[in-house]
Image (tube, rainbow, N blue to C red):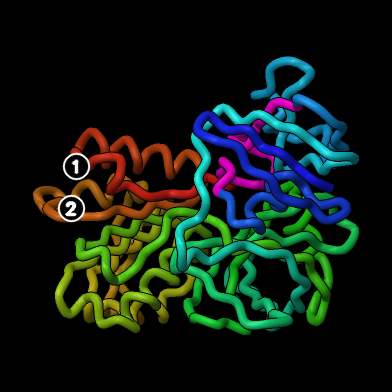
Amino acid sequence: MRIQVNARNRGYEFDAQPGQSVLYAGLSAGIELPYECATGTCGTCKAKLVAGRVGDGWREAPGRKYLKGGAEFLMCQCAPEEALTVEVPDFVYAMEPGTCVPEASTATLRNVRRLTDDVIGFALELEAPRDFDAGQFVLLAAPGVPGYRAFSMSNFARGARRLELIAKRKPAGGFSEWLFDADREGAKLECFGPLGKATFEPGLGKNLLLIAGGSGIAGMMSILARSAEARYFDTHRGWVFFGVRTMRDAFFLKELSAYAGKVKVAVALSEEDPSATSEWPALVFERGLVHEVAKRAMAGKYQNVRAYVAGPPPAVDAAIRMLLLEARLTTDNIRYDKFS
């Protein structure tokens, strides 16, 4: 189906495959249509239908509450049923050369393992090599579970044949319940990506501050892997703050310890006091919410800093407020993707 998107600055034309959403088709064509979650939650990808008909794949999508009038729709959830003309209330640009353009594919689920009682680690075996930037995420759809869910890569590789991911169990979460409730080794998943703009490249030239709550640590591990590959911390400073409720909820401690010789790593426990332990001598354990622990440790250390934030929305919002009001960082030096 042919789609015409009229943005504030110019128009674009591209084709959608049968059943493919307007957003995914545009992104696959190298056009930076607006989005954040790309899964129907945030409402960022809303657009106005000028001509044509669309089929709505998820009429209960939370992001629909941001729509005004019967002509508005979510580009991530709606697929064209005939040629479309659409208006987007944003400036839209073509992706820059070298951008990792998202694409749809099928992937095989591998190495499913429990990291904590409610966190699972798993891998995707890809059909073909794929590039992605450190800090990006992919969308996954499981058999019999409607809609896509977003997961950040915790590894980094160019031409990757394998993506490492983690998932936290959420009450009534369709994908997480599917993943936790049976042996899913070898299952086929629909995959779309990479997506996300909270990315890191070694040419940045700034000190790195990584603040993550719970499963938000995944994207930070990818940034750390990319940094280590480029020996970035030979010339720049780095701090990692990882927030969990209790020690029972902590994971990736061995992996974080491997980076602790180059960066400062602190684990924030929000619901218990840290006990003396010699198991992870390279890590610091403190009591408090992760943004509070970061605030105490980072006082006076924000010169030439780029901050990355990830995790549950309340943790992300609290960290962003702290970075704006306390650290006085500019918005272009605070990077996050809201897809929870």
Callout 1–callout 2 Cβ contact below 8 Å: yes
The residue carrying mark 1 is 327
Q: CA distance from mark 1 to mark 2?
A: 8 Å
Question: What residue type is disc 2 on?
Answer: Met
Q: Is residue 43 magenta?
A: yes
Residue 298's label in the rendered image is 2
Residue 10 sits in quarter? top right
Residue 291, placed above or below residue 217: above
Q: Secondary structure at mark 1?
A: loop
The residue sitting at 19% across, 42% down in the picture is 327
The answer to whether residue 284 is visible is no
x and y percent of residue 145 in the render?
Answer: 85, 55
Residue 53, placed above or below residue 145: above
The answer to whether residue 114 is visible is yes
Q: Residues within 10 Å of mark 2 (few under 14, many from 20)?
A: some
The residue sitting at 43% across, 44% down in the picture is 316
x and y percent of residue 152 in the render?
Answer: 55, 63
Residue 247, placed above or below residue 299: below
Read off the magenta span: 32-49
Judged by depth in the image, the label closer to the viewer, 1 or 2, is 1
Q: Is residue 94 magenta?
A: no
| Majority SS type along the magenta span | loop
The residue sitting at 29% across, 71% down in the picture is 202
Q: Residue furthest left?
A: 300
Q: Secondary structure at mark 2?
A: helix
Q: Nearer the viewer, residue 14 or 64?
A: 14
The residue sitting at 38% across, 76% down in the picture is 226
x and y percent of residue 64 in the render?
Answer: 72, 28
